[in-house]
């Protein structure tokens, strides 16, 4: 049961990354902060993160594998889930299944890119389908992205979360 709960949490954490995949039909609440201005490289990194989340949620694990560097390290709530292949061949299966069971809303996102390196930090709220109030999970996702010979790849993923009302 603990493994299932961990997989569900991780799955819920992963897929809330952005608009390129299934999101709640309800738009996120307006904030008073203006959207940060991002360079084209940072927008490319965000698109990569969103595309990774989309294929993971769709259960396309071989496609998801291609978004990660072979030595990428995946961490959730203080526990290392493994490198790319260990994660995709193991916990990602449960994550993909669980990701289809929640609505996801982005609360805040920041991205930056320099030459050969980028990060994308996203705060998300995950809720039962159709719920607009009540129990939820707030997840912080950090993805480090690096430029490789074959383009941008995710080199590190870190998810952490907390229960919220």
Image (tube, rainbow, N blue to C red):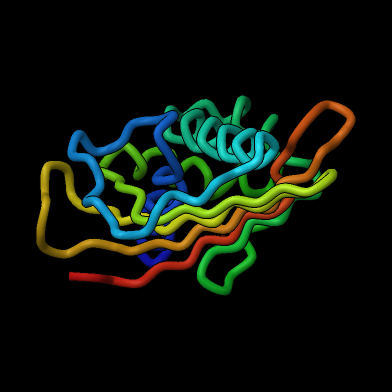
Report x, y in % for residue 10. Answer: 44, 56
Report x, y in % for residue 115. Answer: 84, 45
Report x, y in % for residue 162. Answer: 35, 72
Q: Residue at horizontal 30%, vertical 59%?
A: 32
Is residue 163 visible in the rendered structure shown here?
A: yes
Report x, y in % for residue 26. Answer: 18, 39
Q: Work out whether residue 2 or residue 72 is closer to the camera in this orientation and state it.
A: 72
Instruction: Using residue 111 as the reference point, say whether residue 15 is left or right of it.
Output: left
Q: Residue at horizontal 50%, vertical 29%?
A: 55
Q: Quadrant of the N terminus?
A: bottom left
How many numbered tags mark residues here? 0
Q: Residue at horizontal 54%, vertical 30%?
A: 51
Is residue 7 visible in the rendered structure shown here?
A: no
Q: Is residue 20 above or below residue 159?
A: above
Q: Work out whether residue 64 or residue 85 is closer to the camera in this orientation and state it.
A: 64
Instruction: Using residue 155 as the reference point, say whether residue 45 is left or right of it.
Output: left
Q: Work out whether residue 11 or residue 21 is closer to the camera in this orientation and state it.
A: 21
Q: Which residue occupies the extreme right position in the image?
A: 149
Q: Quadrant of the C terminus?
A: bottom left
Q: Residue at horizontal 16%, vertical 64%?
A: 135
């Amino acid at each position: 049961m603990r493994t299932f709960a961990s997989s569900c949490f991780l799955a819920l954490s992963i897929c809330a990354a952005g608009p390129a995949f299934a999101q709640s039909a309800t738009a996120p609440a307006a904030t008073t902060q203006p959207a940060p201005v991002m360079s084209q490289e940072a927008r490319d990194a965000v698109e990569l993160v969103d595309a990774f989340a989309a294929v993971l949620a769709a259960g396309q694990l071989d496609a998801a594998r291609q978004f990660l560097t072979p030595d990428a390290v995946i961490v959730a709530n203080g526990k290392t889930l493994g490198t790319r292949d260990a994660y995709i061949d193991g916990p990602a299966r449960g994550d993909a299944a669980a990701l289809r069971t929640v609505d996801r809303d982005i609360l805040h996102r920041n991205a930056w890119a320099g030459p050969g390196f980028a990060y994308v930090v996203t705060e998300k709220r995950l809720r039962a389908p159709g719920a607009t109030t009540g129990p939820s999970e707030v997840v912080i996702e950090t993805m480090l992205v690096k430029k490789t010979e074959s383009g941008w790849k995710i080199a590190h993923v870190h998810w952490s979360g907390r229960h919220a009302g």
